[in-house]
Image (cartoon, rainbow, N blue to C red):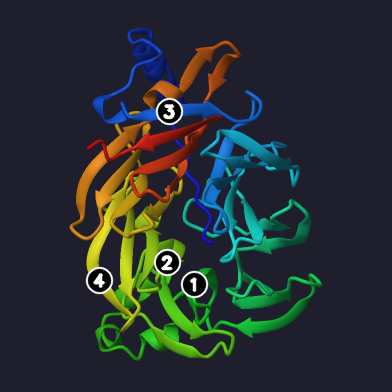
Amino acid sequence: MFVWREFNSNIKIATLAILTFLLFIPVSFSQEENIQYERFRIGEVKEIHSGIALSPQDENIVAISGNKSAPVYLYNWHDNEIISKFDVENWYAGSSIEYSERGNYIVLNQLFYVDWLVSRDKKVFFVIIDKHGQKVLKIDESNEVKISYDEKNALSLSGNKLTEYDLASGKSKNTFAIPAKGFGFALSHDGNFIAVSHEPREEDLKKMPQFKKDKQALKYNLKYKHQVSIYSYPQFEKVTTINEFYDHIYELKFREDDSQLFCLQKPHLKAQTGGLHQTYLNIINTSNWEPIRKGFVSKAIYQPDFKLSHDGRYLGIVSQGGRFPELHVYDYENNRHLDRFEFSYRLIESDEDGLVVADSRPTFVFLPDNESILMVFGNRLFRWNFKKE
């Protein structure tokens, strides 16, 4: 994982603008797109939620992570009931959360609020717990951690090494070398492939015709671009390197049917030609490992969450409006924008519990009906029916 960092130098101006705006609207304000929704509070008023994941074993259950010392909640969204909660770690800025393939383990990884090193990787710590909340393994100084399809092993990427851990004992058992420095990886759902993002190798670029005479282009790509290589698993033999140079890759994710590989990328600060917060979601066809000339754009300040609906018809991706975070929903095949959910009324809310300042990083899951979405933002959970007809 390539850890995301951003900083808004005009935060005071933005805060004054938000407060001025809120003086002239009621707290219950919502746009037309936001009418079909419900909201719930989970946990204490001071707890800010930072991640949500849907259980593969029971699609009525979601796991929700939070910042500081907030517990991990298992929540039945259908019955609006907290099933259990676990104290795991103290996550100052929160943690993202992900279930393993079969739902017996949960992976949490450290998040940051602000970091000046916007275009460099930063290793963080990961914690693996079982579905009952028992800590199984903690891995420090890692770029990415994933659990294998059979749930027997955990893999961790750090630098140019992938380390395989036995989940039963918590001990490392194998190490695989990557030819170049890696930043993140994804495991296919069938357990057969690993996609790794990494720096280009100079010796490889010098063999390419376009770089033999163009030394400036070679230098530029070495400094500002990433590549994606595919390896077999568990043999860990190289299959191919995708014939494309990407901006700095922050996340790789296989589609649930493994037919496509998603690549979330953002240009290096010194290589940006558009807006500061332009982030691109590109797609790779896994049948031939060729890039698909279709993609999506986000303007999110932080690393945007993105997911496909269970039937593959819709793509949701977090973005940023003029002032507030938004969740955008697209017709995936036609690349057509369908709807959006704006979080403006949740930035500052005064209720019976007092003043609540919401976090600005919404995350979400599609529900099994493929018509609604669960989102966490601040100390609230939202259920939004984006298909109103």
Residue positioned most to the front: 79
Q: Nearer the viewer, mark 1 or mark 4?
A: 1
State how far apart marks 4 and 3 are (Cα): 37 Å
The residue pinned by badge 2 equals 256
**Residue under the image location 62 percent in, 77 percent down:** 162
Estimate the x, y position of residue 179 in percent, counting from the top left. Answer: 54, 84
The residue pinned by badge 1 equals 189
Give the residue type that dot 3 points to: Glu
In terms of sequence position, does the residue under pointer 3 or pointer 2 come before the other?
A: 3
Give the residue type that dot 1 points to: His
Disc number for residue 292 = 4
Q: In this view, does 288 lie above or below 153?
A: below
The residue pinned by badge 3 equals 38
Toward the viewer: 22 or 352?
352
Q: Nearer the viewer, mark 3 or mark 1?
A: 3
Q: Residues within 10 Å of mark 3 (few under 14, many from 20)?
A: few
State how far apart marks 3 and 2 are (Cα): 28 Å
Figure quadrant of residue 128: bottom right
Toward the viewer: 169 or 283?
169
**Residue under the image location 31 percent in, 63 percent down:** 282
